[in-house]
Image (tube, rainbow, N blue to C red):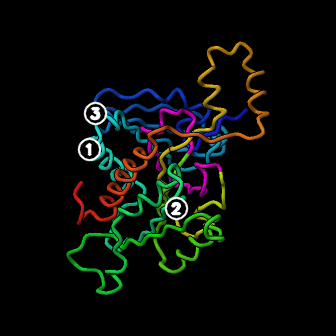
Amino acid sequence: MVFRTDLAIESKGLEHLRQKTEQKGEKAGRELPGIRTEQELFASGIAVTRIRILDGEGRLLTGKPEGNYITIEVEDLLQEPEERKRTAARCLAKELERLIPYHDRLKVLVIGLGNPLVTPDALGPKTLEQVTVTRHIFMMTGKPQVLRAACVSALAPGVTASTGMETAELIRQAVELVKPDVVLAVDALAARDVKRISTTIQICDTGISPGAGTGNLRKDLTRKRLGVPVVAVGVPTVIDSKTLVFDTLGEFIKEEQEALKKLEQLEEPLTVTVTDIGRVVEDFAEILSRGINIALCPGIYSS
């Protein structure tokens, strides 16, 4: 049985990299075949793990394409929301700048993936509501010399069940229209550990599959498909029910392989979430939008 996760840090062979550094600025690295890793404590309660998958060996170990995967872990977000959210947004902005370096002619298309009517899948559209869009200003007046901001456009393409159109095709048409340097996609993800639903952000430069979090996979969004680099930002909002059952009862199961076989045979697997998912989505939408605004419009938003 393969436990489902969209997070590189939860991939098989990388679980032992969960140790955190204890002092601000301290870094720790460990080498695995085809993989390079680095850990850093950004601030109290916020840790960053950077994973670079270098080749086929690393791809086999993790099940992820070659590229960069950055995990931001935020402790006690629901207990200390305001201060922790602001700090987490600054951390996100710093990591985004590694993958999308700002320059005066930068053009970015921000995509809010997901279904706004389904709470665990609404992260993308809710984040997009708070992202600062500037392309219309550039089109009307040209780039103001005093405005230190990227040319930002945005699209919430909805889901195929609502539009009748393939999400990837809509985005490809938008790319042809605005000709961005990079696409920045925001979406809900699935986690292996339920605790990550209120603590984790993942950034990667390998693209994303719309619907990954809810298990309704569509055509992927990658550089190959869209013709421009794709950076994805995601937050786990759901977990597979079989994973949850096995983890909860694991210590009481005597015949582990038999239990796994029974779970694998379930005909109607469920995707589940936490009871306060509405608040989790609202909090992370605020964090993601604030971090994106700082990274793409540094002249408007201070870090």
Mark 2: which secondary structure? strand
Residue at position x 64%, y 14% in the image? 252
Q: Position of residue 168 (x, y in %)?
A: 61, 67
Q: Which residue is mark 1?
A: 82
The CA span between labels 1 and 2 is: 30 Å
Q: Picture coordinates of residue 80 (x, y %)?
A: 28, 36
Q: Nearer the viewer, mark 1 or mark 2?
A: 1
Question: Is-magenta flag for residue 53?
Answer: no
Residue 276 x %, y %: 44, 40
Between the residue at mark 1 and the residue at mark 3, the CA separation in whole angstroms equals: 14 Å
Which three-letter amino acid code belongs to the residue tagged 2? Val
When the figure is inspected, residue 276 is found, relative to residue 163, above or below; the finding is above
Mark 2 or mark 1, which is nearer the start of the sequence? 1
Circle 1 packing at 10 Å, graded few (<14), some (14-19), many (20+), is few
Quadrant of the rendered image containing residue 293: bottom left
Circle nearer the N terminus (1, 3): 3
- Which of the two residues, 174 or 207, is positioned nearer the viewer here? 174
Which image quadrant is residue 164 in? Answer: bottom right
| Residue found at x 67% / y 33% | 242
Of labels 2 and 3, the one closer to you: 3
Residue on which disc 2 sits: 230
The reply, left or right, for residue 245 in relation to residue 277 is right
Q: Amino acid at mark 3?
A: Ser
Residue type, label 1: Glu
Q: Relative to residue 75, is residue 147 drawn left or right? A: left
Residue 13: give its label: none
Mark drawn on residue 44? 3
Q: Which residues are magenta?
A: 190-215
Which quadrant holds residue 191?
top right
Task: Please name whichever residue, 161 or 204, is drawn nearer the observer in this view of the structure.
Answer: 161
Q: Residues within 10 Å of mark 3 (few under 14, many from 20)?
A: few
